Image (cartoon, rainbow, N blue to C red):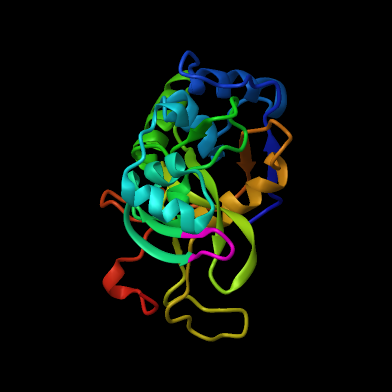
Amino acid sequence: MSNIEIIGLTGLPEFDTSHNLSEMIVEAAFSSAGGIKSGDVIVVTQKVVSKVEGMVRDLLDIDPTPKAQKLATKLGKDPRLVQLILEQSTEIVRTDFERGVLITESIHGFICANAGIDSSNIEGDTSVALLPKDSDASARKILNDIRRLAQVQSLGVIISDTFGRPWRDGHVNFAIGCAGMSPYIDYKDTIDAVGQVLKVTTICIADELAAASELATGKSLNIPVVIIRGSEFNPENEEYESLLRPKENDLFR
């Protein structure tokens, strides 16, 4: 592996449903990165995907149920927000009423705070963004569009979002959707630097690249798309590879 570049694409607008995200990525790539090149991985923040796909909701339109109102009172949250969280969740995993923390399993299978719903980088005092309905499908559409527009086939696309992590403070970006590349690099049965055979080392390259992209996107820089150039990745397999561990294999649930 040679040097890796992390290139933030500047000049992108405040996205909404009227914008063609893929076209604007290709246009911004010419000025910021010399165009889309073979082997590039394009990391797109979830928020702009949600905006373009119409996944922004106004809390003024939400009518909370008694269950949401009761839970919201304990958490110190807006009951309309709690109603949306419950609608976007299959299970409440943990609550901390003193700190107002609500961890759920979202309908997409992610274990995260508030089912991934938040209001950061969303215009309007009562507006919030939900996660895309299917982030893998979103990544697939962006990939196919950019392949056509840029005439480049060897590409990866990652949809990223910011999650907290069990047992560690702080937040990092994770991949919630992926296309054009396997999310994993499997080093099983390869030889390490001292001659040992690796047994179970599988690296989630999609998460590593999503985390690295945050170095360029930040939270207030208005850089929602990053090109990572020079990274190693494997082409996607014909069989779908989930980013999520099945619940039955999770030792902590």
Percent from the top left, x then y, of residue 69?
A: 40, 48
Percent from the top left, x then y, of residue 51?
A: 49, 27
Q: In the rendered image, which quarter is residue 122 located in?
A: top right
Vertical order, 117 against 113 (above or below): above
Left or right of 174, for residue 236: left
Q: In the rendered image, which quarter is residue 26 located in?
A: top right
Q: Residue at x 62, y 42 (%)?
A: 228
Q: Nearer the viewer, residue 247 or 202?
A: 247
Left or right of 224, for residue 18: left
Q: Which residues are magenta?
A: 96-102
Vertical order, 156 against 112 (above or below): above
Q: Nearer the viewer, residue 175 or 165?
A: 165
Q: Residue at x 69, y 43 (%)?
A: 6
- Which quadrant does the N terminus fall into? bottom right
Q: Nearer the viewer, residue 97 or 154?
A: 97
Percent from the top left, x then y, of residue 218?
A: 71, 42
> In the rendered image, is residue 239 in sight?
yes
Residue 99 is one of the magenta-drawn residues: yes
